[in-house]
Image: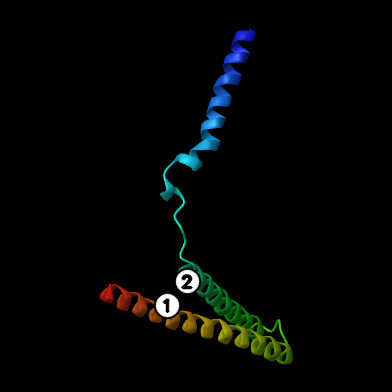
Amino acid sequence: MTFLVLLWIILLGTVLLVYLIFPLFGKADIWPEVDPTEARMQTLSLEREQSYSALADLDEDYESGKLSERDYRELRDELMQETARIVSQLETAAKTDIESEIERYKQQKRG
């Protein structure tokens, strides 16, 4: 019986050791690097969609009578400002991304 316990400990220890060491010596492309610009664009796109959804929900709540006109106007103004900020950041990020692509192209053409 002690032999079986010892065998299990050795097997589990080996599996655990391989699991812990594999990322150090395994393929590097298992966890590919994420382009920060692309990640930021995805985040902003998601925020834009959430903002649009919140505006649609707000309009629906107002139309169904759940909100007074005063509350609706205040909340809508806040959401519109937030949406405008997000869209502006998306446009700026897209412009920056295009400019960086042009610079990369110039560098490749020169070198």
Q: Tag 1: Cα neighbours inside 10 Å, few (<14), some, or many (≥20)?
A: some
* Residue at figure coordinates x 42%, y 77% from the top left: 97
Residue closer to the observer: 57 or 107: 107
- Total tally of numbered discs in the picture: 2
Q: Which residue is mark 2?
A: 37
- In the picture, the quarter occupied by the C terminus is bottom left
Lower sequence index among marks 1 and 2: 2
- For the residues marked 1 and 2, what is the alpha-carbon distance in whole angstroms? 7 Å
Mark 2 and mark 1 in contact (Cβ < 8 Å)?
yes
Q: Amino acid at mark 1?
A: Asp
* Residue at figure coordinates x 73%, y 88% from the top left: 71
Q: Where, by quadrant of the figure, is residue 51 drawn?
A: bottom right
By what rule are the colours in the image chosen?
rainbow
Q: Where, by quadrant of the figure, is residue 99 drawn?
A: bottom left
Residue closer to the observer: 49 or 18: 18
Residue 22 vs 105, above or below: the answer is above
Of the numbered discs in the image, which one, if any, rests on residue 65? none
Q: Position of residue 56 (x, y in %)?
A: 57, 80
Q: Tag 2: Cα neighbours inside 10 Å, few (<14), some, or many (≥20)?
A: few
Residue closer to the observer: 68 or 74: 74
Residue 42 vs 13, above or below: the answer is below
* Residue at figure coordinates x 26%, y 76% from the top left: 109
